[in-house]
Image (cartoon, helix red, strand yellow):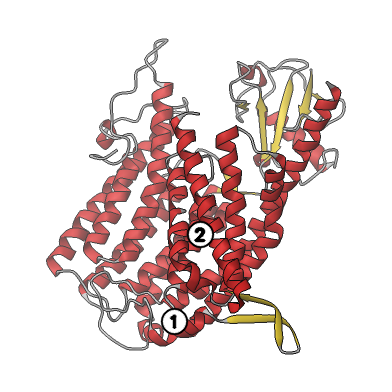
Amino acid sequence: MKLKLVSRSGKEIIAGGLDLPDSSAKVDQLQALIHKLSEEKKIKGALLTPSRQRLTVPGPTPTSKPVALAAGKTLADYDIKDGSTITLKDLGPQIGYQTVFFWEYFGPMMIYPLFYCLRQQIYGKDFTPVLAQRIALYYHTFHYAKRLFETFTVHNFSHATMPIMNLFRNSGYYWGFAAMMSYFINHPDYTSPDETRVKVAFAVAMLMQAGNYYSHVILANLRKSGKGYLIPRGFAFNFVTCANYTFEIYGWFCFNIGTQSVMGVLFMCAGALQMIQWAIQKHARLRKLFDGKDGKEKYPRRWIVLPPFI
Amino acid sequence: MGPKSAYLFLYNSLLVAGWSYILYLTVDETLNGNGTKDAFLRTRKQLEIAQTAAILEVVHSGIGLVRSPFATTALQVASRIAILWGVLIAIPFDSRTAQINLYSVDDTPKIFLNSGTMIIAWSLSEIIRYSFYACKELLGFVPRPIEWLRYSGFIVLYPIGVASELTMVYRGLPHMENNDMYDLKMPNPWNFGFCYYTFLVIGTLLYIPGFPKLYFYMMASRKRMFRSWREADQAKKNK
C-alpha cells in the first residue's frame, strides 16, 4: 500500500510516497521506515528518530483537529489505507522525561543545603541555625528526594520524551527558586515564626507529602491497565480530580506557614498557577470523554484541584 | 459600533490626544530655547496620567477584551512604569536633566540622549500605536498609511527610546546606590531583602536579549504586512 507523506505546509516529503505492506502494519513500523529514510538522507533536515516524529491524519470532520498516531496501534486503527495522506512534524531534539525530572529535582536537593552548610562562607558570619531553618532544610531535601524516588519507581509517564529546551527552562525554574528560598531562609537575619507553629505546620506538611505520594501510586496504577483514560477513584480522587496537585500545593502552603518567607510564597504561587492550569485541562478532558453517552460513564461532580476554591 | 468597540475607540483616542499634547509641550519646550533637557519637568503631570493609563491595556489583555498577548503587554507596560515612576520621578533634579552626548561639533552637542529624546520617542510611538488601534475600532480596518507608520516607526523610535531610557537609568544609578533607595533590609517579618540598585542593573541587562527579540519580531510583522498588501493588490488586479 502506498502512503503520501507531507509536511504541515502540504509539501510532499518523500517523492513517490511510502511503501508499506498493508493496514495491519503498526505505527511503529511507519516510524521506523521514516527514521531509516531520514538516515539515508532521503528526507531533508535533522535525523528523525521516532520520538521526534509527530504523525497525524486529518480528523473526522473538516473542522476537527488532526489525530496523532500513537505507537503500538495499527494503521487500520486510524482508517489508513492505500493512498492516504499522513502529515509529519519534526518535534525537535527530544530528551527523556526521566532525564529531565532527574536534573530538575537533583539540583534543588543539592543547592538548598549549600546555604545552610556553607553559611559562614556565604553570609560571612557563623551562627547557629534556629529550629525552623533546620526543619525546613530536612523537609526541602526530603521532598526532592521523594520526587526523585517517584520518578524512577512510581511514575508512569504519558510520553517518553519532551523537547530538550524544557530541560533548561524547568531546571532554571526549580534551581532558581531553590537558591532564592534557601538564601533567605538560611540567612543569619532570618526571623522565625513561633516554634510551636513551626512544628505543627511541618507535621501537617508531612501528611500532605504522604497524601501526594499515595495519589501518585493511584495514578500510576491507572495507567498500568493500559486501557486508555480511566476515571481516577479512591482516596481523595473521589472528591478532587487532581488530588496529587492538591496535596502538593497544600504541602508548600504548610511549608510557608512554618517558614514565613516571601520567596517561599512566590514559589508556591508559581507552582500552583501551573498546576491549576493543568488541572483545569485534565478535568475538562475527563468530563468531555466521560459524557454519559453511548454507555460511557458520566464523570462525577468533583472539585478540580483546590477545594474549597476551584 | 458595539459598546466594546466604542469603549476601546474612546480609550485609544483619548491616549492619542494625551500623547499628542505631551509631544506638543516637549517640542514647545525645545523650540523656546530651553532645549530637551527640561522636557520632563514640563510634561511630568501629563506623563504620569498617560503612561499610568497604559495599565488598562494590561487589564484589557487579561480579561480578553483585546487579543494582545498578556505577558508581552504586561512586560512592556511594567518597564515603562518602572522607568517613569521608579527612575525619572524618584531620582533628583541633576540626574533627570542629565544627558549623554553622542556627537558634538565645537563643544555643542548635536546628537544626544536625555529625557527629552526619550519623551519624544515615547510620544511618537504611542501616538502611532494608539491611532492604529483607534482606527481598527472605528473603521474595522486600518488605512495603509497608519499601518505603515505602525510597522515602520519602530525602526528608528525603538532604538532612540531604549537608548534614552537606559541613559536615564544609568544617570540615576549613583543616587540609588548612595541612598539605599527602595531597599528592604533584613531582619523583617517577611524574611525578604531587596536591593533596588541590583534590581535595576539586572533589569537593564535583560534589555540585551529582550530588545533584539522585540525588534526582530516587529521586523517580521512588517514583512507580513507588505506580503498581505501585495496579495491584496494582486487579488484586486485579478478581479
Q: Nearer the viewer, residue B237 or A17?
A: B237
Left or right of A79 in this view: A9: right
Inspect the image, locate mark 2, and give the three-letter code of the amino acid beneath it. Ser
The reply to whether residue A181 is in sight is yes
Residue B43, horizontal then vertical, whole percent: 49, 67
Q: Residue at the spot x=69%, y=46% of the render?
A: B221
In the depicted structure, whether residue A109 falls above or below residue A238 = below
Considering the image in quadrants, where does the C terminus of chain B appear?
top right
Left or right, residue B196 beside residue B150: left
Place of residue B161 in the rendered image (x, y in percent of width and height, measured from the top left) = 61, 66
For the residue labelled by badge 2, is the local secondary structure a helix, a strand or a loop? helix
Amino acid type shown at disc 1:
Pro
Q: Which residue is mark 2?
A: A171
Q: Is circle 2 on the same chain as circle 1? A: no
Q: Nearer the viewer, residue A154 or A37?
A: A37
Q: Does A244 appear above or below A285?
A: below
The answer to whether the residue labelled 2 contacts the one labelled 1, judged by CB atoms less than 8 Å apart, is no
Foreground disc of the pair 2, 1: 1
Residue A161: percent from the left, percent from the top?
A: 58, 44
Residue at far left of view: A196
Circle 1 residue: B92
Residue closest to the eye, A67 or B136:
B136
Classify 10 Å Cα crowding around label 2: few (below 14), some (14-19), many (20 and above). Answer: many
Q: Which of the chains bears the disc numbered 2?
A: A
Rendered residue at 31%/65% (across/down): A262
